[in-house]
Image: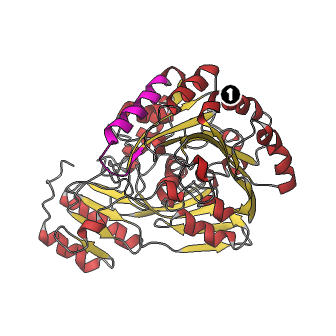
């Protein structure tokens, strides 16, 4: 699949148009500029064709067209890929965003969702029945990419990752066929898509298990000055060893944003936040959080009972589309004194008001799923760092990227792995690290079976050779 540098065979394109129900956008058309934008504004790529699919038949037609054309293929649902691999130069973007159907079965506690659904849309539908699929932390994230890489979010310690709720998928394969994968039908493929990303085909529909959640949770940040970071992290490290799985937390360092709910005196100051989400009995949650509230005490306490959907949208203003984002990530086994000191030191060097880095608390239900039950790696990690250097545009971006790399490098002696959804384009060795050698080789065998020509290679790629 060497590609043909974006030259489209008009005869093949005519064949695609004859069967394609969605919209096809090419360079030079009025909406091409907007159509090629993705969440990470630092990514600027120019595809030869963007195919907006209305359903699985459109996806299959687009895959067959791309294969016949020799064009590179990128697959886009929410367009939130950190590395921008949902967009390509001189190839075809198979865009799933029109595919937004959601079907909730409240009695069976299941939901079917097409691949263009965003997290907030799913939450709105499922919360009407007091149910939820554990998912991510920003509501305009695409459900498809999040799920296929694992799915870190505010309910993960109680119920597991998003992928742990998956009951079945329907996907279009590299030859343009359509298959179902679940525990009994194509079970090895089902194992692989639960963590292996888009390497084996284009998933067009997901079926999930639902869980009772809320609709009210005890959630929000408690905030301290960054000068308290090391002392806070040492307390936090000890405190979380005893907290129940109903509580998921993340420690975030950044400059406090100028939001109405944050005291004006904190705006622009470097701070350390512990963001909490308690999904259980609210009175019990207050008891669990009491030691954290008494530490310090915090300069601001915004943790309160609120609708789960409100908490899910809390970080949306901090991660809008179009900013320039650069990420480095790693898992660590625990917050040792050395990890804490490195963290505090680099947090004090944050310069951009848009840069931040959450440290997600893992464990709980994540670790109770067997390491080999899904392709997801790192289930025994204690925490995952998501180091995010951000600017509004190109100005200052190199400085933020250097800062992010510096923190990641300083933590290198403590790395135990990496969450695949947090990778940029970092090469095969980092992909292998995300899965571990045994699972990586199993995924390669699966890739040889389902995509031997590596048509689906614009991802955290598992090469078939």
State left or right for residue 173 relative to residue 67.
right
Q: Answer whether residue 213 is visible to the viewer in this image.
A: no
The residue nearer to you, when weighing 172 against 17, is 17
Point 62% across, 49% down: residue: 161
Task: Based on the picture, tell me whether residue 401 belongs to the magenta stretch.
Answer: yes
Q: Residue 293's spot in the image, x, y percent?
A: 78, 42
Residue at numbered disc 1: 231
State left or right for residue 313 relative to residue 130.
left
Q: Residue 350's spot in the image, x, y percent?
A: 47, 36
The residue nearer to you, when weighing 400 against 163, is 400
| Region rendered in magenta | 390-410
Q: Residue 3's spot in the image, x, y percent?
A: 18, 52
Location of residue 30 with respect to 342 vertically, above or below: below
State left or right for residue 396 relative to residue 271.
left
Q: Residue 153's spot in the image, x, y percent?
A: 61, 50
User: Quarter of the image holding residue 342?
Assistant: top right
Task: Based on the picture, tell me whether residue 296 belongs to the magenta stretch.
Answer: no
Q: Residues within 10 Å of mark 1 (few under 14, many from 20)?
A: some
Location of residue 452 with respect to 124 vertically, above or below: above
The residue nearer to you, when weighing 445 against 319, is 319
Q: Quadrant of the C terminus?
A: top left
Which SS class for mark 1? helix
Point 77% across, 33% down: residue: 239
The residue nearer to you, when weighing 372 against 111, is 111
Location of residue 34 with respect to 247 vertically, above or below: below
Q: Answer whether residue 143 is visible to the viewer in this image.
A: yes
Q: Main secondary structure of the magenta part?
A: helix
User: Quarter of the image holding residue 86?
Assistant: bottom left
Point 46% across, 29% down: residue: 408
State left or right for residue 159 relative to residue 124.
right
């Amino acid at each position: 699949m060497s590609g043909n540098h974006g030259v489209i065979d008009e005869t093949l394109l005519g064949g695609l148009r004859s069967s394609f129900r969605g919209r096809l956008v090419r360079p030079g058309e009025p909406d091409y500029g907007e159509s090629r934008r993705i969440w990470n504004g630092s990514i600027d790529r120019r595809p030869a064709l963007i195919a907006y699919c209305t359903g699985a038949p459109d996806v299959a037609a687009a895959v067959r067209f791309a294969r016949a054309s020799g064009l590179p293929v990128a697959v886009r649902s929410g367009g939130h890929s950190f590395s921008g691999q949902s967009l390509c130069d001189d190839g075809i973007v198979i865009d799933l965003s029109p595919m937004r159907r959601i079907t909730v079965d409240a009695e069976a506690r299941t939901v079917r969702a097409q691949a263009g659904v965003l997290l907030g849309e799913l939450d709105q539908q499922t919360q009407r029945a007091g149910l939820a699929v554990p998912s991510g932390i920003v509501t305009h994230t695409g459900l498809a990419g999040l799920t296929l890489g694992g799915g870190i979010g505010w309910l993960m310690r109680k119920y597991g990752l998003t992928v742990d709720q998956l009951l079945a998928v329907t996907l279009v394969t590299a030859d343009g066929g359509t298959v179902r994968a679940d525990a009994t039908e194509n079970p090895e493929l089902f194992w692989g898509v639960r963590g292996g990303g888009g390497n084996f085909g284009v998933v067009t529909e997901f079926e999930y298990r639902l869980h009772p959640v809320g609709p009210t949770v005890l959630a929000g940040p408690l905030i301290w000055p960054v000068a308290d970071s090391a002392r806070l992290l040492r307390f936090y490290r000890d405190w979380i060893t005893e907290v129940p799985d109903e509580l998921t937390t993340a420690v975030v360092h950044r400059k406090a944003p100028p939001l109405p709910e944050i005291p004006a005196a904190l705006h622009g100051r470097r701070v350390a936040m512990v963001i909490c989400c308690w999904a259980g009995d609210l009175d019990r949650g207050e008891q669990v959080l009491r030691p954290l509230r008494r530490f310090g005490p915090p300069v601001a306490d915004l943790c309160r009972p609120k609708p789960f959907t409100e908490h899910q949208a809390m970080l949306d203003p901090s991660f809008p589309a179009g900013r320039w984002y650069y990420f480095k990530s790693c898992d660590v086994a625990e917050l040792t004194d050395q990890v804490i000191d490195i963290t505090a030191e680099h947090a004090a060097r944050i310069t951009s008001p848009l840069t931040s880095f959450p440290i997600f608390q893992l464990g709980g239900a994540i670790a109770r799923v067997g390491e080999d039950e899904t392709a997801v790696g790192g289930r025994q990690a204690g925490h995952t760092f998501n180091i995010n250097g951000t600017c509004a545009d190109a100005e200052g971006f190199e400085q933020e990227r250097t800062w992010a790399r510096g923190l990641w490098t300083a933590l290198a002696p403590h790395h135990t792995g990496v969450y695949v959804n947090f990778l940029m384009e970092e090469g095969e060795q980092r992909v292998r690290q995300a899965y571990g050698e045994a699972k990586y080789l199993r995924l390669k065998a699966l890739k040889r079976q389902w995509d031997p020509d590596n048509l689906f290679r614009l991802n955290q790629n598992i090469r078939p050779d």
